[in-house]
Image (cartoon, rainbow, N blue to C red):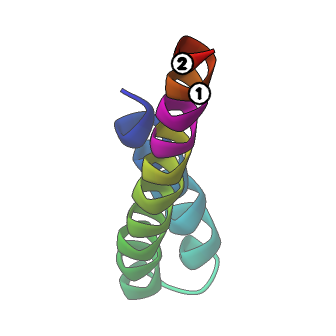
Amino acid sequence: MSRSRHAALGASIGAAIGGLISRNAASTGAGIGALAGAIVGEKRVSARSRVEEAVDQE
């Protein structure tokens, strides 16, 4: 859930910024934003799971 939410947010921000330039830039910005958002979402999920594992071990 976290990855998809971050990807959608990144895509919307990228499209908005790219849309200020042109239509082609809007679609490119959406793609790049979605990729960046998915990466951020994945990092957050993996960090959260590591913290939960550490708490469970104690």
Q: Where is residue 28 in the image (x, y as percent from the top left)?
A: 38, 81
Which residue is denoted by mark 2 in the rendering?
57
Residue 44 vs 35, above or below: the answer is above
Crowding near the residue tagged with mark 1, few <14, some 14–19, many ≥20 C-alpha atoms within 10 Å: few
Q: Toward which corner of the image does residue 34 lie, by quadrant?
A: bottom left
Q: Residue at x 49, y 56 (%)?
A: 37
> Which residue lies at the image location 52% right of the left edge and 36% below the top edge?
50
Q: Is residue 3 above or below residue 33?
A: above
| Residue 22 sits above or below residue 51 on the image | below
- Please give left or right for residue 58 compared with residue 41 in the image: right
- 15 is within the stretch colored magenta: no
Q: In the displayed structure, does residue 26 sit left or right of residue 18?
A: left
Circle 2: element type: helix
Q: What element carries label 1?
A: helix
- How many numbered marks, from 0 up? 2
Instruction: Report the quarter where the C terminus lies.
Output: top right
The amino acid sitting under disc 1 is Ala
Quarter of the picture holding the N terminus: top left
Residue located beneath label 1 in the image = 54
Mark 2–mark 1 contact, CB under 8 Å? yes
Label 2 vs label 1: CA separation? 5 Å
User: Residue at the spot x=44%, y=32% of the render?
Assistant: 2
Q: In which quarter of the image is residue 20?
A: bottom right
Residues in magenta, as a range:
46-51
Left or right of 55 on screen, residue 30: left
Q: Position of residue 17 (x, y in %)?
A: 64, 71
Residue ID at (54%, 18%): 57
Question: Looking at the picture, which amino acid does disc 2 mark?
Answer: Gln
Residue 47 painted magenta? yes
